[in-house]
Image (cartoon, rainbow, N blue to C red):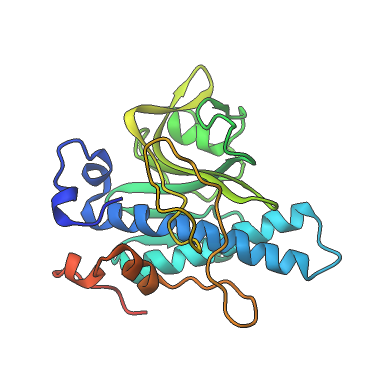
Amino acid sequence: MLTSADTFDSDDDWLTRWVGQRAAFVLTTYAVPCLHFAHAEAARLFDSTAYLNATAYGQLRYHILCEALGRVIESRLSGAEVHRPSDRIGTAFTIECAGRVIYPYKYSEGAADPYAGFRLADDDALKGRLTPGDAPRQGILAGMPELPPGELLVLAWAGNHKDGLTRAVLGVPTLDAGRLRWAEGQVLELDLRLGDTGGSDDRSAGTRPAGRAPVCDKDGRPILDLDRIDAELGVDFDSLFPFHGRSPR
Protein backbone atom coordinates (compact mmCIF):
# COMPACT_ATOMS: atom_id res chain seq x y z
CA MET A 1 0.00 0.00 0.00
CA LEU A 2 1.08 3.54 -0.74
CA THR A 3 0.07 5.75 2.17
CA SER A 4 2.61 8.56 2.39
CA ALA A 5 4.63 10.88 0.22
CA ASP A 6 7.82 9.23 1.50
CA THR A 7 6.62 5.88 0.16
CA PHE A 8 6.06 7.40 -3.28
CA ASP A 9 9.67 8.60 -3.44
CA SER A 10 11.07 5.06 -3.32
CA ASP A 11 13.56 4.44 -6.13
CA ASP A 12 12.04 1.04 -6.88
CA ASP A 13 8.46 2.33 -7.20
CA TRP A 14 7.96 1.70 -10.90
CA LEU A 15 4.25 2.51 -10.78
CA THR A 16 4.88 6.01 -9.39
CA ARG A 17 7.47 6.61 -12.09
CA TRP A 18 5.00 5.42 -14.68
CA VAL A 19 1.90 7.42 -13.77
CA GLY A 20 2.92 9.80 -10.95
CA GLN A 21 2.29 9.81 -7.21
CA ARG A 22 -1.35 10.80 -7.28
CA ALA A 23 -2.39 8.23 -9.91
CA ALA A 24 -0.35 5.50 -8.20
CA PHE A 25 -2.16 6.19 -4.92
CA VAL A 26 -5.60 6.29 -6.55
CA LEU A 27 -5.07 3.04 -8.46
CA THR A 28 -3.57 1.06 -5.57
CA THR A 29 -6.09 2.38 -3.05
CA TYR A 30 -9.42 2.43 -4.89
CA ALA A 31 -9.25 -0.08 -7.78
CA VAL A 32 -9.81 -3.08 -5.49
CA PRO A 33 -12.76 -1.50 -3.62
CA CYS A 34 -14.32 -0.68 -7.02
CA LEU A 35 -13.91 -4.31 -8.07
CA HIS A 36 -15.44 -5.51 -4.79
CA PHE A 37 -18.32 -3.09 -5.29
CA ALA A 38 -18.95 -4.23 -8.88
CA HIS A 39 -19.02 -7.90 -7.84
CA ALA A 40 -21.33 -7.25 -4.88
CA GLU A 41 -23.79 -5.03 -6.74
CA ALA A 42 -23.93 -7.37 -9.77
CA ALA A 43 -24.50 -10.33 -7.44
CA ARG A 44 -27.30 -8.47 -5.65
CA LEU A 45 -29.06 -7.66 -8.91
CA PHE A 46 -28.43 -11.14 -10.28
CA ASP A 47 -29.80 -12.88 -7.17
CA SER A 48 -32.93 -10.72 -7.12
CA THR A 49 -33.79 -11.29 -10.79
CA ALA A 50 -34.84 -14.81 -11.73
CA TYR A 51 -34.30 -14.54 -15.49
CA LEU A 52 -30.68 -13.37 -15.46
CA ASN A 53 -28.00 -15.93 -16.37
CA ALA A 54 -24.26 -16.07 -15.70
CA THR A 55 -23.48 -14.11 -18.87
CA ALA A 56 -25.81 -11.32 -17.79
CA TYR A 57 -24.12 -11.28 -14.37
CA GLY A 58 -20.74 -10.77 -16.01
CA GLN A 59 -22.08 -7.96 -18.18
CA LEU A 60 -23.65 -6.26 -15.16
CA ARG A 61 -20.39 -6.53 -13.23
CA TYR A 62 -18.41 -5.02 -16.11
CA HIS A 63 -20.68 -2.02 -16.60
CA ILE A 64 -20.95 -1.39 -12.86
CA LEU A 65 -17.14 -1.44 -12.65
CA CYS A 66 -16.93 1.02 -15.54
CA GLU A 67 -19.23 3.47 -13.78
CA ALA A 68 -17.76 3.02 -10.29
CA LEU A 69 -14.08 3.23 -11.24
CA GLY A 70 -14.85 5.97 -13.76
CA ARG A 71 -16.46 8.12 -11.05
CA VAL A 72 -13.53 7.53 -8.68
CA ILE A 73 -11.00 8.55 -11.32
CA GLU A 74 -12.95 11.68 -12.23
CA SER A 75 -13.34 12.57 -8.54
CA ARG A 76 -9.77 12.05 -7.35
CA LEU A 77 -7.55 12.09 -10.42
CA SER A 78 -8.11 15.45 -12.09
CA GLY A 79 -6.72 15.60 -15.59
CA ALA A 80 -7.35 11.95 -16.38
CA GLU A 81 -9.76 11.14 -19.21
CA VAL A 82 -12.22 8.29 -18.77
CA HIS A 83 -13.65 6.45 -21.79
CA ARG A 84 -16.79 4.39 -21.07
CA PRO A 85 -18.71 1.86 -23.17
CA SER A 86 -21.72 4.15 -22.66
CA ASP A 87 -19.92 6.93 -24.56
CA ARG A 88 -20.63 5.17 -27.85
CA ILE A 89 -21.04 1.62 -29.12
CA GLY A 90 -17.68 -0.17 -29.27
CA THR A 91 -15.86 2.12 -26.86
CA ALA A 92 -13.55 0.20 -24.55
CA PHE A 93 -13.38 1.20 -20.89
CA THR A 94 -10.00 2.87 -20.58
CA ILE A 95 -8.41 5.68 -18.58
CA GLU A 96 -5.88 8.05 -20.14
CA CYS A 97 -3.51 9.43 -17.54
CA ALA A 98 0.03 10.87 -17.59
CA GLY A 99 0.53 9.78 -21.18
CA ARG A 100 -0.49 6.19 -20.38
CA VAL A 101 -3.62 4.16 -20.99
CA ILE A 102 -5.04 2.06 -18.14
CA TYR A 103 -7.22 -0.91 -19.11
CA PRO A 104 -9.12 -3.28 -16.74
CA TYR A 105 -8.95 -6.85 -18.03
CA LYS A 106 -10.75 -9.86 -16.51
CA TYR A 107 -8.42 -12.75 -17.21
CA SER A 108 -9.99 -15.62 -15.31
CA GLU A 109 -12.43 -16.84 -12.66
CA GLY A 110 -10.12 -18.05 -9.90
CA ALA A 111 -7.04 -16.84 -8.02
CA ALA A 112 -5.05 -19.98 -8.77
CA ASP A 113 -5.16 -19.40 -12.54
CA PRO A 114 -2.01 -17.88 -14.04
CA TYR A 115 -2.35 -14.19 -14.83
CA ALA A 116 0.63 -14.02 -17.18
CA GLY A 117 0.85 -15.72 -20.54
CA PHE A 118 -2.85 -15.60 -21.42
CA ARG A 119 -3.40 -15.83 -25.15
CA LEU A 120 -4.39 -12.93 -27.38
CA ALA A 121 -6.44 -13.79 -30.45
CA ASP A 122 -5.04 -12.74 -33.81
CA ASP A 123 -7.90 -10.29 -34.27
CA ASP A 124 -7.74 -8.88 -30.73
CA ALA A 125 -7.43 -5.10 -30.89
CA LEU A 126 -5.20 -5.14 -27.79
CA LYS A 127 -2.61 -7.09 -29.74
CA GLY A 128 -2.70 -4.40 -32.41
CA ARG A 129 -1.87 -1.78 -29.78
CA LEU A 130 1.08 -3.78 -28.47
CA THR A 131 2.64 -4.77 -31.80
CA PRO A 132 4.27 -2.00 -33.86
CA GLY A 133 2.85 -1.79 -37.37
CA ASP A 134 0.03 -4.26 -36.72
CA ALA A 135 -3.17 -2.47 -37.74
CA PRO A 136 -5.80 -2.84 -35.01
CA ARG A 137 -8.91 -4.72 -36.05
CA GLN A 138 -12.43 -5.04 -34.72
CA GLY A 139 -12.51 -6.50 -31.22
CA ILE A 140 -13.27 -5.74 -27.59
CA LEU A 141 -10.86 -2.79 -27.69
CA ALA A 142 -12.09 -1.34 -30.98
CA GLY A 143 -12.70 2.02 -29.30
CA MET A 144 -9.43 2.11 -27.41
CA PRO A 145 -7.33 5.26 -27.89
CA GLU A 146 -4.20 4.93 -30.01
CA LEU A 147 -1.00 4.54 -28.01
CA PRO A 148 2.61 3.56 -28.63
CA PRO A 149 3.62 0.00 -27.64
CA GLY A 150 4.64 -0.17 -24.00
CA GLU A 151 2.34 2.67 -22.89
CA LEU A 152 -0.41 0.38 -21.58
CA LEU A 153 -1.03 -0.40 -17.89
CA VAL A 154 -3.39 -3.33 -17.30
CA LEU A 155 -5.57 -3.84 -14.22
CA ALA A 156 -5.85 -7.62 -14.57
CA TRP A 157 -8.28 -9.36 -12.24
CA ALA A 158 -10.00 -12.66 -11.60
CA GLY A 159 -13.35 -13.29 -9.97
CA ASN A 160 -16.60 -15.17 -10.09
CA HIS A 161 -20.17 -14.97 -8.83
CA LYS A 162 -19.65 -17.28 -5.86
CA ASP A 163 -16.34 -15.94 -4.50
CA GLY A 164 -16.38 -12.35 -5.74
CA LEU A 165 -12.98 -10.82 -6.46
CA THR A 166 -10.21 -13.41 -6.18
CA ARG A 167 -7.14 -11.60 -7.50
CA ALA A 168 -6.10 -8.19 -8.84
CA VAL A 169 -2.81 -7.17 -10.46
CA LEU A 170 -1.44 -3.96 -11.97
CA GLY A 171 1.17 -4.60 -14.63
CA VAL A 172 2.80 -3.44 -17.84
CA PRO A 173 2.17 -6.01 -20.59
CA THR A 174 4.51 -7.20 -23.30
CA LEU A 175 3.96 -9.66 -26.12
CA ASP A 176 5.99 -12.86 -26.09
CA ALA A 177 5.24 -15.52 -28.71
CA GLY A 178 1.69 -14.28 -29.09
CA ARG A 179 0.96 -14.27 -25.37
CA LEU A 180 0.56 -11.38 -22.99
CA ARG A 181 3.12 -11.37 -20.18
CA TRP A 182 4.26 -8.81 -17.63
CA ALA A 183 7.31 -6.68 -18.29
CA GLU A 184 10.14 -7.55 -15.90
CA GLY A 185 9.92 -5.60 -12.65
CA GLN A 186 6.65 -3.91 -13.65
CA VAL A 187 3.91 -5.90 -11.95
CA LEU A 188 2.19 -5.32 -8.61
CA GLU A 189 -0.25 -7.66 -6.89
CA LEU A 190 -2.95 -5.69 -5.08
CA ASP A 191 -4.21 -6.37 -1.56
CA LEU A 192 -7.75 -7.73 -1.79
CA ARG A 193 -8.55 -6.72 1.79
CA LEU A 194 -8.93 -3.09 0.71
CA GLY A 195 -12.53 -2.01 0.91
CA ASP A 196 -13.86 -5.29 2.37
CA THR A 197 -15.90 -5.81 5.52
CA GLY A 198 -13.20 -7.07 7.85
CA GLY A 199 -11.35 -10.30 8.42
CA SER A 200 -7.85 -10.90 9.66
CA ASP A 201 -5.40 -8.00 9.90
CA ASP A 202 -2.57 -10.30 8.86
CA ARG A 203 -1.16 -8.85 5.64
CA SER A 204 1.99 -10.93 5.55
CA ALA A 205 3.72 -11.45 2.23
CA GLY A 206 2.22 -14.11 0.02
CA THR A 207 -1.28 -14.06 1.50
CA ARG A 208 -4.07 -13.86 -1.05
CA PRO A 209 -7.37 -13.61 0.81
CA ALA A 210 -10.59 -14.17 -1.12
CA GLY A 211 -12.44 -10.96 -1.87
CA ARG A 212 -15.30 -9.99 0.42
CA ALA A 213 -18.32 -7.82 -0.28
CA PRO A 214 -18.13 -4.16 0.78
CA VAL A 215 -20.28 -2.64 3.51
CA CYS A 216 -23.98 -2.47 2.61
CA ASP A 217 -26.75 -0.02 3.48
CA LYS A 218 -29.92 -0.98 5.37
CA ASP A 219 -31.50 -2.25 2.14
CA GLY A 220 -28.58 -4.55 1.36
CA ARG A 221 -27.08 -2.42 -1.37
CA PRO A 222 -23.25 -2.21 -1.37
CA ILE A 223 -21.65 1.15 -0.61
CA LEU A 224 -18.50 2.56 -2.20
CA ASP A 225 -17.35 5.14 0.35
CA LEU A 226 -13.88 6.52 -0.42
CA ASP A 227 -13.73 8.63 2.74
CA ARG A 228 -14.42 5.53 4.83
CA ILE A 229 -11.65 3.66 3.03
CA ASP A 230 -9.26 6.56 3.66
CA ALA A 231 -10.20 6.59 7.35
CA GLU A 232 -9.60 2.84 7.68
CA LEU A 233 -6.16 3.28 6.13
CA GLY A 234 -5.38 6.32 8.28
CA VAL A 235 -4.79 8.68 5.34
CA ASP A 236 -6.11 12.12 4.44
CA PHE A 237 -6.35 12.36 0.67
CA ASP A 238 -6.46 16.17 0.51
CA SER A 239 -3.48 16.50 2.87
CA LEU A 240 -1.55 13.87 0.96
CA PHE A 241 -1.96 15.87 -2.25
CA PRO A 242 -2.24 19.46 -0.94
CA PHE A 243 -1.50 21.13 -4.26
CA HIS A 244 -4.21 19.29 -6.10
CA GLY A 245 -6.99 18.40 -3.68
CA ARG A 246 -9.82 16.45 -5.23
CA SER A 247 -11.93 17.10 -8.28
CA PRO A 248 -15.50 18.33 -7.82
CA ARG A 249 -17.85 15.48 -7.03
Q: Nearer the viewer, residue 38 or 71?
A: 38
Position of 203 relative to 85 (above/below): above
Position of 158 relative to 241 (above/below): above
| Quarter of the figure with residue 3 | bottom left
Percent across and percent down for residue 115 are 52, 32
In the image: residue 215, left or right of residue 194: right
Q: Residue at x 37, y 68 (%)?
A: 74
Q: Residue at x 27, y 48 (%)?
A: 19
Position of 154 relative to 197 (above/below): above
In the image: residue 65, left or right of residue 133: right
Percent across and percent down for residue 99 are 29, 48
In the image as oriented, which residue stretches furthest toward the top?
Answer: 177
Task: Report the number of discs.
Answer: 0
Q: Residue at x 39, y 42 (%)?
A: 153
Residue 241 visible at all:
no
Residue 244 visible at all:
yes
Which quadrant: the C terminus?
bottom left
In the image as oriented, which residue stretches furthest toward the right?
Answer: 51
Q: Nearer the viewer, residue 229 or 241?
A: 229
Q: Nearer the viewer, residue 123 or 246?
A: 246
Percent across and percent down for residue 128 are 50, 33
Percent across and percent down for residue 51 are 86, 64
Q: Residue at x 85, y 67 (%)?
A: 50
| Quarter of the figure with residue 230 | bottom left
In the image: residue 29, left or right of residue 93: left
